[in-house]
Image (spheres, helix red, strand yellow):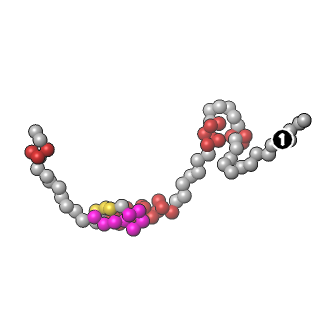
């Protein structure tokens, strides 16, 4: 059996580009996709807290983890 033995039953459908993400969709689903795509594009992604993930399961209290962008005060050196 060769690839040429199979008939090509490709249905040519008209695709419409999404105005938000520029992906192409069939005309019967573009309205539903654009509504979802607009809603998803307005949402901000949740920030990942690496300190929380590292402390998870270690017994370190979460209030002792350093937050991103937080400056930890250092104790002065004792000479």
Left or right, residue 43 beside residue 34: right
Q: Position of residue 50 (x, y in %)?
A: 61, 43
Any part of residue 35 in sight: no
Name the chief secondary structure element in magenta.
loop
Quadrant into which the C terminus falls: top right
Position in image of residue 66 (x %, y %): 70, 44
Q: Nearer the viewer, residue 71 or 27?
A: 71
Residue bearing the label numbered 1: 75
Residue at the location (54% across, 54% down)? 45
Residue at the spot x=69%, y=34% of the render? 60
Using residue 17 as the reference point, say whether residue 54 is left or right of it: right
Residue 75: percent from the left, percent from the top? 84, 41
Q: Considering only vertical position in the picture, is 20 above or below 1? A: below
Q: At 11% from the left edge and 46% from the top edge, which residue is drawn? A: 4
Left or right, 28 with reference to 74: left
Q: Residue furthest top?
A: 58
Q: Would you call the spot at circle 1 few (<14 residues within 10 Å), some (14-19), or many (20 or more)?
A: few
User: Residue placed at 54% from the left, 58% from the top?
Assistant: 44
Residue 45 visible here: yes
Give yes or no for residue 17 being in the magenta stretch. Answer: yes
Outermost residue, bottom side: 19
Task: Give the quarter of the image for residue 57.
Answer: top right
> Quadrant of residue 14 in the image?
bottom left
Which residue is most to the right?
79
Looking at the rendering, in which quadrant would you find the N terminus?
Answer: top left
Based on the picture, tell me whether residue 72 belongs to the magenta stretch: no
SS label for mark 1: loop
Segment colored magenta = 15-22
The location of residue 20, given as percent across then percent down, is 42, 65
């Amino acid at each position: 059996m060769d690839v040429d033995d199979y008939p090509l039953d490709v249905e040519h459908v008209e695709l419409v580009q999404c105005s938000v993400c520029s992906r192409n969709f069939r005309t019967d689903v573009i309205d539903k996709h654009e509504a979802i795509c607009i809603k998803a594009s307005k949402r901000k992604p949740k920030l990942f807290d690496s300190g929380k993930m590292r402390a998870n399961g270690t017994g370190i209290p979460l209030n002792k983890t350093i937050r991103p962008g937080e400056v930890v005060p250092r104790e002065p050196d004792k000479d």
